[in-house]
Amino acid sequence: MNQRFFNTSLKFCILGSGSWATALMKLLSDKQNIKICWYIRSGETISHIEKYGNNPKYLSSIRFDTSRFEMSNDINQALERSNVVIIAMPAIFIAELMETVTVDISGKFIVSAVKGIIPELNKSVSEYFNEKHNIPYSQLGVISGPCHAEEVALERLSYLTFSCKRKNLAEFISKNIETPFLRIISSTDVYGSEYAAILKNIYAIGAGICHGLGYGDNFISVFVSNSFEEMRRFLNDTNLSPRQTTRSAYLGDLLVTCYSQFSRNRALGTMLGKGYSVSSAMMEMNMVAEGFYASKCMHEINETEQVVMPIAETVYRILYQNASAQNEIKKLSEEVLL
């Protein structure tokens, strides 16, 4: 992607129809002079939005002016109409969807608004597009928190971090997303932003487990502060960079995911702490909890990296090895947490 991109009319495409995709679609469609296409797999959902002006499954209170954008359930058609592609769907569906793509995406700017990791491949979204689809990092961006879609939909003051190796390009695209209630911080730490977002979901499951077991705020604050130190250690041990991990994309996103009522990962953990089996808790969830899949991926990644990560390993054992949540958290409290 060359300098001419800055003089080109931006044509956005959003892939996905969940809560985050819906919130981002509202932000973009309310802005003037932006061309945008919304890829939604379900033709039935498209028909509903065209007729009633809202997404029937997610953030249904949001009203759309459908004259401001196009919709398509044809991924190739949606991609052809765009030069900036925002991926806002669960990570578990991305590789399968991209296998159906036949159009050339080599000149497009790919933005991940995903807070998960590609299962089986154990790759972040930017790593996946760089290695599998040969998209250079100069054409890859990451949108990270701390930001829940529900509060964006309510137009509560929120902050995002937009990471890209080319900071001037991140700032250029950010200006087209920013609103009076949504402020955007630019960063060049693509790796750190993505892996912080992946890890914070695992720790939020752990915080939810503690809550479900009956531990109070005092203990959970210690759990979260230790989780932050573990996150910082992983990021710096695997990708040393002059990042400030106390900033919004790292500590801020961890805090909101561990404490917010809107956090699906915390909700999953709370059910586990209350005695639900993993399978029954997953069935209760009406949205994907990225931390469930990320836990296994990070366990496998760390078999190679060998970073000291006792909290992430505790959550992994509870999720995948049928370990007792009560016993595992008690052991953490006695041997690890400071």
Image: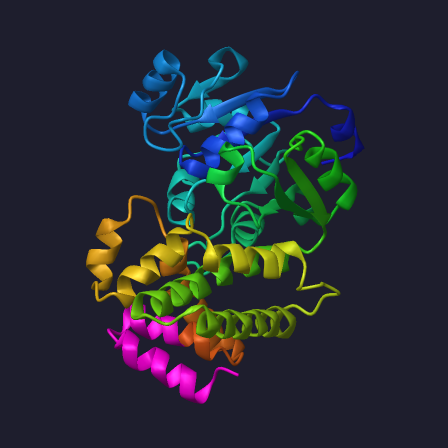
In the displayed structure image, the side of residue 8 where residue 225 appears, left or right: left
- Residue 45 x %, y %: 33, 24
- Residue 263 x %, y %: 42, 51
The foreground one among 240 and 221 is 221
The foreground one among 183 and 304 is 183
Q: Is residue 38 visible?
A: yes
Identify whether 226 is placed above or below 70: below
Identify whether 245 is placed above or below 50: below
Q: Is residue 81 visible?
A: no
Number of residue marks: 0
Identify whether 28 is placed above or below 236: above
In the displayed structure image, the side of residue 275 where residue 185 appears, left or right: right
Task: Report if residue 335 lies within the magenta region.
Answer: yes
Q: Residue at x 46, y 31 (%)?
A: 22
Q: Picture quarter containing residue 96?
A: top left
Q: Picture quarter containing residue 74?
A: top left
- Residue 125 x %, y %: 52, 50
Quadrant of the frame with the N terminus:
top right
Q: Main secondary structure of the magenta part?
A: helix
Identify whether 318 is placed above or below 152: below
Q: Which residues are magenta?
A: 314-338
Q: Picture quarter containing residue 75?
A: top left
Task: Report if residue 93 lies within the magenta region.
Answer: no
- Residue 212 x %, y %: 31, 65
The foreground one among 44 and 110 is 44
Q: Residue at x 70, y 46 (%)?
A: 185
